[in-house]
Amino acid sequence: MNVLLIGSGGREHALAWKIAQSPQIGKLLCVPGNTGTAHHGQNVPFPLDDFAALIDLAQREAIDLVVVGPEQPLADGIADRFAAAGIPVFGPSAEAARLESSKAYAKEIMAEARVPTAAAHVFATAAAAADFVRSSGAAWVVKADGLAQGKGVVVPDSVEETLAAIAQLSGDLPGQQLLLEERLIGREVSVLALCDGRRLVALPPARDHKRLGDGDVGPNTGGMGVVAPVDDVTPGQLDQIVSSCLQPAIDAMAARGTPFHGVLYAGIMLTETGPKVLEYNARFGDPEAQALLPLIEGDLLEALYGCATGNLQPEKLRRRKGYAVCVVLCAAGYPERPRKGDAIRGVEAVDDNKVLIFHAGTALGATGLCTAGGRVIGVTGLGGTLRQARERAYESAAGIRFEGKHHRMDIGKEPTP
Ligand code: AMP
Ligand code: GLY
């Protein structure tokens, strides 16, 4: 099977690594790919927004399956275009991807499907949202409707902070609808499921660490590290999350005639009254993929193809025993102004089967490997216990050196933060 993989982050390196292990893999083309994907396939430097040229490439290379990593091309309709050209795609249509690209739409689906979630109000203008907040006399979680690369949500503590958040988000993301949401209290967990339009297979529950600093302080980032599975979600709770938070949304999308093919990612708050959905994403998380894909046993490529073609066979995917801890090594200045061009050393030395190195923001310069983005490398440690996985990840992380390297020290620390 010839595969075209879209994207260039750590997530796509993890996908390329796992897809390349399939006995069915033929050619693996990565557009544009990165230093890591180049170990498993062929990188093709191509603009992601030229869909006609991408389809042309896929037809020329006899591609059997397109796998889309990031959210933007999905929201822009890349899956629809490939599907129209008769090429199976792992990744939802633009309409189904609205579960991520419009928070107001996601709320509409959740209401229709009776998925437990925070109460929310949608406003067309900042002024209308501010009026509502003043008359409610309470603090609200403020969200911009559309894709915002993790910068579209503020969780204020007071009316004043809520009003400031409305002003900030409407200034940063002009023209978007705003949502005011009831604040939920609890621990967060992410549950990702492979979906074929009707059926789904849930992956182990994972926990992202979005804040820059240890103990969840500092600015939000794309994700500083992931632990999977998380032990505070029991198998019974995972079943409950699947049946109350994921399957009903898949059913609702199918009933609307816009079935969801791809990864449905539910960000969940474990509240006192049960799990509630904070958000949906329509793709693998980054760095969630770097922790979750190593925990899958079985042929991922076959499963992705099954999702694309409505023929997922859940019994064929098994979960590997044990834990994965992914620690993200960041460049100097991340997240505000990441510096590029610092030489990276020590990467070759660490690959030992219990630790996986996933490239995100690296480049191969004239003098060797160097930093080329904010999140540089994800180091995933695997182990029979959480502690072993964590120790392996941190040992290897210490051996990778570049000027300005920084990372969280508390990923997978027991009890998980
Ligand atoms: P989202 O992109 O919607 O998942 O929001 C990003 C982060 O904001 C989440 O991971 C939560 O930490 C927080 N958040 C979002 N919605 C709520 C809510 N209703 N109550 C409390 N925290 C929230
Ligand atoms: N790590 C968070 C995300 O991919 O959305």
Image (spheres, rainbow, N blue to C red):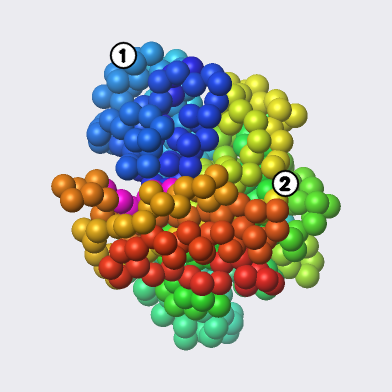
Q: Which residues are magenta?
A: 358-363
Q: Quadrant of ligand 1?
A: bottom right
Residue 170 rendering spot, x and y as whole percentages:
36, 67
Q: Name the image quarter holding residue 16.
A: top left
Query: Amino acid under label 1?
Result: Arg
Main secondary structure found in the magenta portion: strand
Question: Residue 303 in magenta?
Answer: no
The CB of the residue at mark 1 lies under 8 Å from ligand 2? no
Q: Name the image quarter holding residue 392.
A: bottom right
Residue 215 rendering spot, x and y as whole percentages:
55, 77
Q: Which quadrant would the C terminus be assigned to in this image?
A: bottom right
* Residue 214 in view of the camera: yes
89 above or below 324? above
Task: Give the side of residue 417 with respect to residue 97, left or right.
Answer: right
Numbered disc in front, either 1 or 2: 2
Residue 355 rendering spot, x and y as whole percentages:
53, 51
What residue appears at the point 51 percent right and 63 percent down from the top-left corner? 395
Task: Give the side of residue 22 with respect to residue 415, left or right.
Answer: left
Query: Amino acid under label 2?
Result: Lys
Residue receiving disc 1: 60
The CB of the residue at mark 2 lies under 8 Å from ligand 2? no
